Image (cartoon, rainbow, N blue to C red):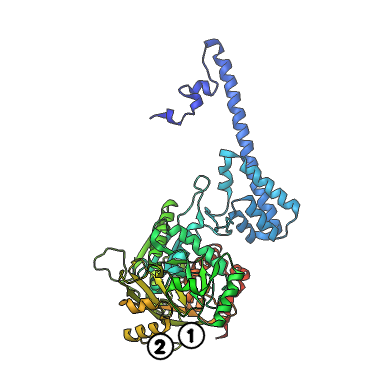
Amino acid sequence: MKSSQNVPKCCSGNLHEYYGLRNTSTKSSFRHSRHSTVRVAVWIFLIVIMLSGSCIAHASSSFVIRRHIGPRATRNIKTATSTRARRMMLQKKNLTTTTMTMISRFRNNCGRMGKFKAPYRFLSTTTTTSRRMNRNGDNLLGTTCDDINNVAIVGGGLAGLSAAYHLLEKTIVNKNEEGYDSLRLTVFDTAPVGTGGASSVAGGLLHPFSPRGKLIHHGIEGLDATNHLLSVASKYEPKCILRDQMYRLALTEQHEQQLRETAIKFPQHCDWLDTHDMNLVCHTTESRGGLRFKSGKVIHVPTYLQGLWKACQELSSKSGGDIEWVLLQQDEQEQEPSLPPPQTQEEWKSMLRRFDTVVLSAGAGLLQDQLVTTKNPEKSDWPVQLVRGQSVELKVPTTTAPTPSYEAVLCGKYATPLVDSTKMLIGATHEFQPEAMPVEEVVKDLRERSYSLAPWLWDDGVVDTVTHGWRVQSNRGPKGRTPILGRVPPSTALHDNAWIFTGLSSRGLIHHGLYGDILTDAILTNDEEGMFTKHDHLQWWKKYMDKT
């Protein structure tokens, strides 16, 4: 046994000298022993005093808080791990300045205890707490690790991976001060990362403006939130960002006027190009000029999702958690963890029962696979429509394709580059009927509607692939098409603590980061009402369903 490893450096090799128990002579041994005993007793007395002070401070502060705001709020305040967070909560309860000063003083006294801080933690009536913060650094109060330990996310597209990343990002754990229960996160999907669902076939055009040049609701905030996720994902998949600009054509006099006004209002995001300059870029003779979105980006969404998943894996590894992607299909080669897809609601409930929190973000699959029930079996009670979109990948010979035209151009439809530099994507159809439009009709329809964007592409290109996917389009409201965000109504839920994130419509890329951030704040604080108070426009779907 090597006890010297635990001995402080200042007493290396001589414990008697460190504690004042030197035995230099027989005559003085008793005297030194007596003095050392007194010293030890003094130290023990001081330790007892400090520990008692910590206990009294904790008990006194708990009494003051409970006296003024009641036991329920006391539990929330105990989970706050900083003086600033406590003070913010207390101010909301209108405590007096004197009371807040007393609580801060007690907290600071306990904080100065150094290595004797442990008894304060032992006396706490709450379970071990991890520090959960949003990207602004604000503490999310009222949530313990025991509340959210095991999370299932059904659907790993833009919405699902945004929720996954934000949950992991906000779970910040100080292992030196507190114990914690790591977050286990499981994503269920019918395809590998970035290869299934509407997200994998999205056009990837990131910008904050409507077709008429108006700034969409939460456009700038959404752009910032998505850029944050892009900066993370691009560390693992740098090729996910294909271009850092795009162009919108003006084909009519009215449209030209609208886009010119946009350039004047938002010079930091776009500038106006006259007819000559725009035709040089797009090689079209029909434009009246247009906008260059200099703050926009062209994203290859499948590659972006793969990078974001790798970022989630890295976050989980650093925090000591566990993360897994489970395929809901029979994987004969057993290359990925897989399960047979549930066929009934009872099978879904059985599969999700072991999780304490469930996020439903499967898009069209929520309705197609009956993950959310409806009162009327023949018609959905949810305020959404399922829209099929088909796009065409055109292969262009490098000998005939003008180099400047490998830029993203949009005006109603869009033409955008792909990872393969010899291909361009033209999209997309909007189909509401159950039967898919035949390939020949898809090509004909898209050619008629997008020829003015890139005539050289249709003249020289060859159809290589037709892609398709279903998206959930929410009903239009005062703020445009706002997603469905919040807790699943108990009557339609597969789980006691189920949340929903869907209905991003055609704005999945611009809004998935922002609304994933908002939703995970509500999940971690178990406060849907607070989310609706701060973002009143998100209540629209609840009001709709209450009427039906």
Report the amino acid beneath label 1.
Lys
454 or 411, which lies in front?
Answer: 454
Query: Mark 1 to mark 2: distance in Å?
Result: 22 Å
**Vertical placement of residue 290 versus 68, above or below:** below
User: Residue at coordinates 44% horizontally, 87% vertically from top-left?
Assistant: 377
Label 1 Cα crowd, 10 Å radius (few <14 / some 14-19 / many 20+): few
The x and y percentages for residue 39 are: 60, 25
The x and y percentages for residue 79 are: 58, 55
Secondary structure state at the residue bearing disc 1: loop
Residue 51 position by quadrant: top right
40 or 529, which lies in front?
Answer: 529
User: Residue at coordinates 35% horizontally, 79% vertically from top-left?
Assistant: 458
For mark 2, what is the residue? 433
Q: For residue 375, which numbered disc appears in the image?
A: 1
- Left or right of 86: which side holds 127? left
Q: For residue 77, which numbered disc appears in the image?
A: none
222 or 190, which lies in front?
Answer: 222
The x and y percentages for residue 70 are: 67, 60
Q: Are marks 1 and 2 in contact (CB under 8 Å)?
A: no
Residue 110 visible, this angle:
yes
- Left or right of 546: which side holds 404? left
Residue 202 visible, this angle:
no
Residue 216 position by quadrant: bottom right
**Vertical placement of residue 87 versus 201, above or below:** above
User: Residue at coordinates 36% horizontally, 76% vertically from top-left?
Assistant: 457
Whichever of callouts 1 and 2 sits on the residue coming sooner in the sequence is 1
Q: Quadrant of the C terminus?
A: bottom right
The x and y percentages for residue 145 are: 50, 57
Residue 369 position by quadrant: bottom left
Report the amino acid beneath label 2.
Gln
